[in-house]
Amino acid sequence: MASVLISGAGPIGLTMANELARYGVSVRIVDKAAARTDKSKALVLWPRTLELLRHGGYVEPFLKAGTVAHGAQLSDGKNIVARVTMDGIDTAYPYALMIAQSETERVLEETLASRGVKVERSVSMESFSEKSTGGIEAVLRKADGKSETVQADWLLGCDGAHSTTRHALGFTFEGSTQDSDWYLADVHVTGLEPTDILHIFWHRDGILAFFPITAGRWRVIADLGPATGTAHHADPTLEEIQAMVAHRGNPGIKLKEPVWLAAFRINERKVKDYCRGRVFLAGDAAHIHSPAGGQGMNTGMQDAFNLAWKLNLVIKGVAKPSLLDSYSTERSAVGEMVLSNAGRMTEAAIARNPVIQSLRNAMVKFALSFPQIGHVMADTLSELNIAYPKSPLSVAGAQHAHGPMPGHRWPEPIAADTGKSRFMAIGPADAVADLVAKFPNLVEPANGAKRADARDLTLVRPDGYVGFAGAASDRAEAEAYLRTIAA
């Protein structure tokens, strides 16, 4: 019997499986699709996701497969409105890693296979029930029509926007579908320079955006304005996309050799709670948003990073089951923020009123003339500013801390997690040694924390966020914090 059953082998399910397998948790992962996607779909891995992949020890294959984009350029079709650069952000990865979702899934699946776990394809989870004795009983349907009843301790629904898991839980997917149509083209492009940035044209007739994928290959997105009915818009032809590019973009941009052409509408939806009992939702099963900002897949993968270390500690008997309550609290708040940010960016991009367009362009140009504002925007896109200040796991000591506050990202790698998912203690050697001695399965000393302040005592969570932050004298408070978590 697998300890954890994962329904869905997209980027989120694969990330979840990799993290749990890395911790030594028994995992079974199924997907109704016969093969992983061959479409580019989600296109970017942001710096925070790369940091978490580095922490898990498997970022290098992504770096080799992706293409670096250093920022974005906004234009009104004639003049450059503003530029956003990521070069100055505080991370080892000051860029957007452009990588097709098909490649992201390939790397994740190959990494998972190297850990001894194989995705079971053409297998769908049809139903499940929680047993009174604890655990999950699920019915799996295979390609030949035969069913299998399986037992697991936990169920993770990573099964997308039409999640069987979410429907079975009866959770409401609150939100709406925008009443506008969009075109998408994965196509080869010439005449667009420079090639290491995102190009966004805020034309009076609508947005046109180019996202680099690989050398010469780009994702093109354009909005068509308000929808004229409920029927799905026909997929575009290459000629239609080329005509729109000629109208809204710079002269000389030519398209050829399309890989994927599609029309779509934007959904913005989210569940209130991400879990019930031994069942958890992650990724599109819990939240879907506008593609503006490219945050969707990254948000889902970070759901996985957040849940996996907590689930591991509970499964191993190191932490109380109540630790898992923080998953929904933390990630639902992040989902709300991403949904709001992406919605605002979309509304600004598709504004049709000429007065509003002029005001938007002037305000953005003025705001981004200040480096501090550009830095904030870069931190938002990179997801480095994601934090959990209101989490029950974010606790301040009695005295003031001089470093990052509880719930905020620790700004440097201090150790690669070898599969123990322990808190890293940073502070006076005797205080750290005392905490390690009292909580040997939950805490270990940090190695090489160059940004530590000698006046502080800090506990950094396994996912790189500060859990406890106080003064060096706050030993009793740090110990009390750990006792709320330890089993």
Image: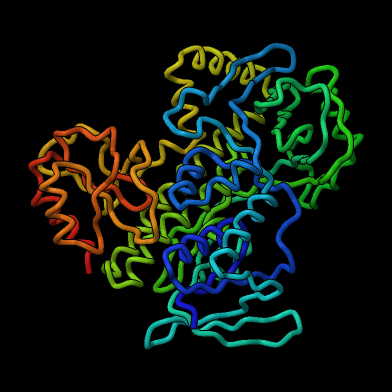
View extreme (right): residue = 239
**Which residue is at a point 43% across and 37% down the rendered structure image?**
384
Percent of width and height locating residue 142: 70, 81
User: How are the residues colored?
Assistant: rainbow
The answer to whether 104 appears left or right of 49 in the picture is right
Residue 335: percent from left, percent from top: 47, 49
The residue at the point 71 percent across, 30 percent down is: 209
Position of residue 105 relative to residue 222, above or below, is: below
Q: Position of residue 174 (x, y in %)?
A: 53, 56
Seen from the viewer's position, the closer of residues 150 and 164 is 150
- Please report the residue visible at 28 percent of the width from the left and 66 percent of the height from the top: 322
Q: Is residue 220 visible?
A: no
Quadrant placement of the C terminus: bottom left
Q: Is residue 304 above or below residue 379?
A: below
- Residue 194 position in % (x across, y down): 71, 21
* 45, above or below 167, in the image: above
Direction from residue 347 to residue 16 in the image, left or right: left
Q: Is residue 312 left or right of residue 48?
A: left
As drawn, 169 above or below 271: below
**Picture quadrant where residue 191 is located:** top right
Count of marks placed on residues: 0
Is residue 122 visible in the rendered image? The answer is yes
Q: Tell me the residue at 45%/74% (across/down).
A: 154
Nearer to the camera, 99 or 481: 99
Closer-to-camera residue (109/401): 109
